[in-house]
Amino acid sequence: MFVSDFRKEFYEVVQSQRVLLFVASDVDALCACKILQALFQCDHVQYTLIPVSGWQELETAFLEHKEQFRYFILINCGANVDLLDILQPDEDTVFFVCDTHRPVNVVNVYNDTQIKLLIKQDDDLEVPAYEDIFRDEEDSGSDSDGSEPSEKRARLEEVCLGLLQRDILFDYEQYEYHGTSSAMVMFELAWMLSKDLNDMLWWAIVGLTDQWVQDKISQMKYVTDVGVLQRHVSRHNHRNEDEENTLSVDCTRISFEYDLRLALYQHWSLHDSLCNTSYTASRFKLWSVHGQKRLQEFLADMGLPLKQVKQKFQAMDISLKENLREMIEESANKFGMKDMRVQTFSIHFGFKHKFLASDVVFATMSLMESPEKDGSGTDHFIQALDSLSRSNLDKLYYGLELAKKQLRATQQTIASCLCTNLVISQGPFLYCSLMEGTPDVMLFSRPVSLSLLSKHLLKSFVCSTKNRRCKLLPLVMAAPLSMEHGTVTVVGIPPETDSSDRKKIHCRWPGPRHIFFFGRAFEKAAESTSSRMLHNHFDLSVIELKAEDRSKFLDALVSLLS
């Protein structure tokens, strides 16, 4: 059931209890976790934190700890599946679920005792009515008087009702999308409790920015939520100019900015940022000689010397940096890049350290998805969680260096895929597979990294192809996961269309109209071919597959979507 009063029905319930936190491995979940940890620290709430990267880890951890806890909090996992069916908990166990994954499973919505959904109901959830999808036992057969015709009629009505219920559920579940950031939901709880701090507000901003960076929400939703947070920023960071209210040298300041859509440019050189940001790399077509020439023309149009552009941003002449945003925006408009600036936020730690929200997202994501063998997934999770604290700026700067490496590898892989024609049309979708031995291939074995690569590759492919039909197709991408076990990670990405609202992942193919939910399509394709597939990730459009089953799985997917 949906929780209407977060304070009374959630926080005051767990405040006097010992609770277990299951936190998914994404930046928004980490930010929500940080806010909740801060609240728990204020009120001395005892809790245990367990990071979970997929359903297997969640089930194993629950089985291990279910005897010790009655209350469980799930962050960015659990809403879009029948949680009770998967975990099989005791009857007195209660789950509080704060998850952005949509659609919310109907069993979770209509369970009043064990599932408590910490989800904003103004998210246009469109949950079917209870009576449309569930039929109470006392209703069945109540109209039958025992005669043969009436029994036949009752059976026919039951079959028709079953088909109707299936259609209603299919219509509801056919789209996969994301709702309001969990970090924002947790910050609103802190605000209700009058315990919101500037740090919590920053984590809410980073959580929202993570959704925008990963293209999980529409531009309209992002701008709306930025407006909500902007009001809180004004409230927390307002200072008069008199001496009594001046800020101390080392204080934290958050400000709203209309900044450049360039990744990490304040911690990199402007040239590197232009070359490794998906938006500019795809518009310039930097994988081609012509694209490199266009970049040089762009820099010449701005009148920026190459020596300045290729050195660290911090070392650029102050006179150039002062008007840099306006210069870049003016030249970008001439080159067809109308969205070069975006609404965002920045944070200052004293006068020395300044970060944009997107900088922190890239750094934290890179720390969490690090391919280094010297630490477990839990170690990477803890390191990423620590990097969000002001006291661990060294970890954040280390994350920025990892992020630069990841962004470079992403653009090099995209250039390689496009130049060697690895993106091929399978009919109803585009397909690309990274082979073992490809440079930096292990950087893309994790789901978030591979999803980002896939989205950026599709953007670049759409900019490079002249085939109008291919521009409307989704992309299925595979990358090696484990050579030892012979497995690959497969992700499904929706079509790259500027006009469509990205809330709903759908596509119309020529011929019969098919609207598919990638997770469901993957399941059906694997089932029909007996492919060994593992649906372990919380995003249903990400699966693990045995490498030798890949060709028959793809053939089934093509016939299913044709």
Image (cartoon, helix red, strand yellow):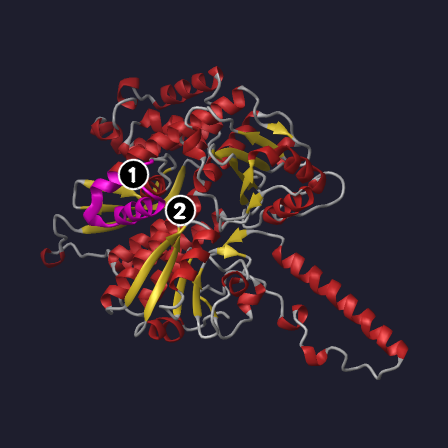
Query: Height in image: 289 above or below 206?
Result: above
Residue type (three-letter) at the residue carrying disc 2: Asp
Question: What is the span of residues highlighted in magenta in the rendered image?
Answer: 373-397
Q: Is residue 432 visible?
A: yes
Residue type (three-letter) at the residue carrying disc 1: Gly
Residue 436 lies, in percent from the top left, at 49, 26
Single out the residue that lies furthest toward the left: 243
**Dot 1: what SS?**
helix
Q: Which residue is mark 2?
A: 210
| Residue depicted at x 28% and y 64% | 39
Which corner quadrant of the image does residue 332 belong to?
top left
**Dot 2: what SS?**
helix
- The disc at residue 399 is 1
Give the prevailing secondary structure in the magenta stretch.
helix
Which corner quadrant of the image does residue 214 belong to?
top left
Residue 110 lies, in percent from the top left, at 56, 71
In front here: 527 or 154? 527
Q: Which quarter of the rendering shows the C terminus?
A: top right
In front here: 35 or 272? 35
